Image (cartoon, rainbow, N blue to C red):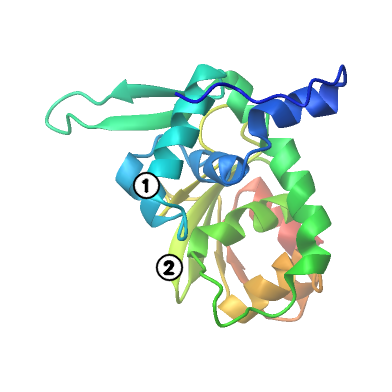
Amino acid sequence: MSPRRSYDQYCSAARALDVVGDRWTLLIVRELLAGPRRYTDLHADLPGVSTDVLASRLKDMERDGVTTRRRLPPPAAAYVYELTGRGRELLPVIQALGSWGEAELGERRPTDAVRAHWFALPLLRSLNGEGLVEVRLEEGHFHLYAGAEDGPVYGDGPAPREPDARLVLDAGTCASLARGELSLGDAVRAGRVTVTGDGAPAKGLRDA
């Protein structure tokens, strides 16, 4: 485990960056907002990170109380990493960075990797009301826990139960939402997003 580097500045922003300012750390947090993940899953969804760097960052994050590691019971018998309560407190930080970065996103470059669930947090910023929301794209499905105060914020694949709202849209619309060019309400009104369901998130979008 590498010794913690510090800016040695008596400033809360500097202290925060001592813990989460290393390259890849906040992107690991983004992935773990989906709940417990195995090392191999994290590596697959963080294209470009080396195995050594990922292992080092996870050790540092565990040391600093941002993540924890536990062994799943049989038959899985695999280790998973998950955020601690302190780690989950980084959600508004990630969301603020995402909002700030909308202007930097631009069109997708040929070298840019993409995963369907990377659109989860931008969509979550646009939802009103609490509930389970399933999002269907041609590239894949994911689900969101709108208004969740604890536990996973989103997850890969279809919703684990009947969702309170189901959104169907294409990747182009998702990209426009992520870039801040289009609001979710405007996309619904323009017919670019189909909304079904009777829960609060669905009603909020239909009434927007």
* Residue 150 x %, y %: 57, 26
Depth order, front residue of 207/123:
123
Height in image: 38 above or below 136?
above
Give me the residue at 22% from left, 32% from top.
78
Depth order, front residue of 21/7:
7
Q: Mark 2 sits on what residue?
A: 140
**Which labelled disc corresponds to residue 51?**
1
- Kindly identify the amino acid type of the residue bearing the numbered disc 1: Thr
Depth order, front residue of 172/199:
172
Q: Is residue 92 visible?
A: yes
Height in image: 185 above or below 24?
below
Height in image: 32 above or below 14?
below
* Residue 198 x %, y %: 59, 53
- Kindly identify the amino acid type of the residue bearing the numbered disc 2: Gly
Give me the residue at 65% from left, 27% from top.
19
In the rendered image, which quarter is residue 23 located in? top right
- CA distance for labels 1 and 2: 26 Å
Q: Is residue 160 visible?
A: no
Give me the residue at 67% from left, 51% from top.
124
Query: Which is nearer the N-term, disc 1 or disc 2?
Result: 1
In the rendered image, which quarter is residue 158 located in? bottom left
Residue found farthest to the right: 11
Give me the residue at 55% from left, 49% from top.
144
